[in-house]
Image (cartoon, rainbow, N blue to C red):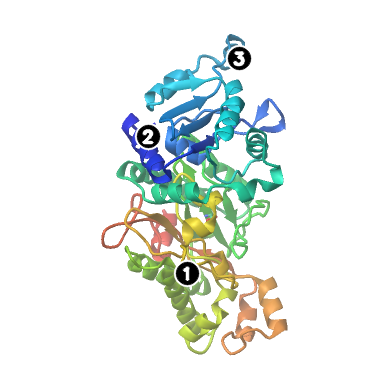
Amino acid sequence: MFSQETYINRRSRLQADIGGGIILLPGNDDSGMNYKDNIYPFRQDSCFLYFTGIDQPGLTFVMDIDNNREILFGDELTIEAIMWTGPVETIASLAAKVGIKDVRPTSALPDFLARARSSKQPVHFVPPYRGDTTVKLSEWLDIPVAAIPQQVSVALIKAIVRQRAIKTAEEVHEIEMAVNTTIDMQLKAMELAAAGVTEIAIAGGIQAVAIAGGGNISFPVILTVNGQILHNHPHNTPLQNGQLVLCDCGAENAMRYAGDLTRTHPVNKKFTTAQKEIYDIVHHAYQSAADAVKPGIRFKDVHLLACEKLAEGLIALGLMKGNAAEAVAAGAHTLFFPCGLGHMLGLDIHDMENLGEEYVGYTDTLHKSKEFGLKSLRLGRELEEGFVLTIEPGIYINPMLNDAWQAAGKHTAFINYEKLAAYKNFGGVRVEDNFLITADGGRKLGRPFASTANEIEQLIAR
Ligand code: GLY
């Protein structure tokens, strides 16, 4: 938990921004995996955590701006519950640590909200992403479940995004800790990778590193020899010499801040010529994007710059043809890079994504494109000092997509389908790091870590 002042300041700023009514922040509950008492690891709701710092299930926080009061609703564990769990810090004690003075039982919440509604106080809440929270909001606020999405508070969403998008020094410190544990995960993946080892043995090994780091994984590990599949989660393929291993993983630290890194390395410790050629193109696009980020530049333009670098490299290699800028304008490069360059990072791996990508990554004047490729770009807006984001270009050779495009005769002026046939089993390459936007550029987070093909080879040769 940060200092009391951090949470008090965050809440005062939010209340001033909203101006009146009630802000309702439901925390998460424990969630059963296969029966009620056999639970998933608890993960607090990130908005609740950001404004209260309390990482416990079963709580709801209310800021009654009109009446200048903050109330935490929740029930202390009974002696019978503590018999199973052991002593836990009381809700009252946790609340006091973060400057919340009023703690009431959960049973008092429905009446409290009913009274607020009968006094015509607006109740602001953000989009729920869990079924139990949706049902609670429906019951508390007398809104049909199906109508909840239309009743969310855009004012609250925008106010939260304004705050959470700009990371303070203490948050950057936490993210950097998560990034460093993520580097440990990547190192473990490189150590475990060998011909005959099945992907799951490596994925499990690196998950253990995240947990041993004091937190957990920040998203399900992507560890695959099928790197052409953007988020490939099945892990049942044994590694073979000559293949590339794409490892996209992240640790969440004890404070729940996330890291998110990708490295791609050869199973037998040496890139083939074809692998290195593609890797170098991806790394050049990555470095060009990393050099370009700074306050005021639109991330969409950084994305398009990276796309152009990828297209230039693919043209030089003969897999694409024509002019790179024209190819990107036509969308031909999306055969190889059908997704976005990056996303915000913070308490969530896709930070604040449930608040709505339009609000997090775009603005009232810059809307998300519906075009293939750009529609997967989660962040497009102008960058600001204090943003933390990922830069993660890739080249993916997906035979299914190639065949479909070739059959449809798509972008034949820019794609050399004949040459591409030889790369059918290539897989994919992605390089990803996490950056803080500083006053005049971007600072890569975490300790130094190999990212070029040569650096990767030197690292895994040891
Ligand atoms: N690195 C995983 C993701 O961006 O979804």
How packed mark 1 is, by other alpha carbons closer than 10 Å (few <14, some 14-19, many 20 or more), is many
- Describe the element under mark 1 as helix, strand or loop: helix
How packed mark 2 is, by other alpha carbons closer than 10 Å (few <14, some 14-19, many 20 or more), is many
Q: Nearer the viewer, mark 1 or mark 2?
A: 2
Three-letter code for the amino acid on which mark 1 is drawn:
Tyr
Answer left or right for 108 relative to 35.
left
**Could you tell me which residue is drawn at 61 percent across and 75 percent down?**
423
Q: Find residue 266 and report its horizontal and vertical position in percent.
A: 52, 61
Q: CA distance from mark 3 to mark 2?
A: 29 Å
Q: Nearer the viewer, mark 1 or mark 3?
A: 3
- Furthest residue in direction left, as rendered: 440
Mark 1 Cβ inside 8 Å of ligand 1: no
**Could you tell me which residue is drawn at 65 percent across and 74 percent down?**
424
Query: Does the rendering let one see residue 203?
Result: yes
Marks 1,2: beta carbons within 8 A: no
Mark 3 Cβ inside 8 Å of ligand 1: no
Q: CA distance from mark 1 to mark 3?
A: 54 Å
Residue denoted by label 1: 279
Residue denoted by label 3: 81
Q: CA distance from mark 1 to mark 2?
A: 44 Å
Residue denoted by label 2: 7
Residue placed most toward the observer, 347 or 409 = 347
Residue placed most toward the observer, 144 or 248 = 144
**Could you tell me which residue is drawn at 40 percent across and 40 percent down?**
15
- In the picture shown, does residue 29 fall above or below 96? below
Three-letter code for the amino acid on which mark 3 is drawn:
Ala
Q: Find residue 331 and report its horizontal and vertical position in percent.
A: 56, 79
Task: Say whether disc 1 or disc 2 marks the residue closer to the N-terminus.
Answer: 2
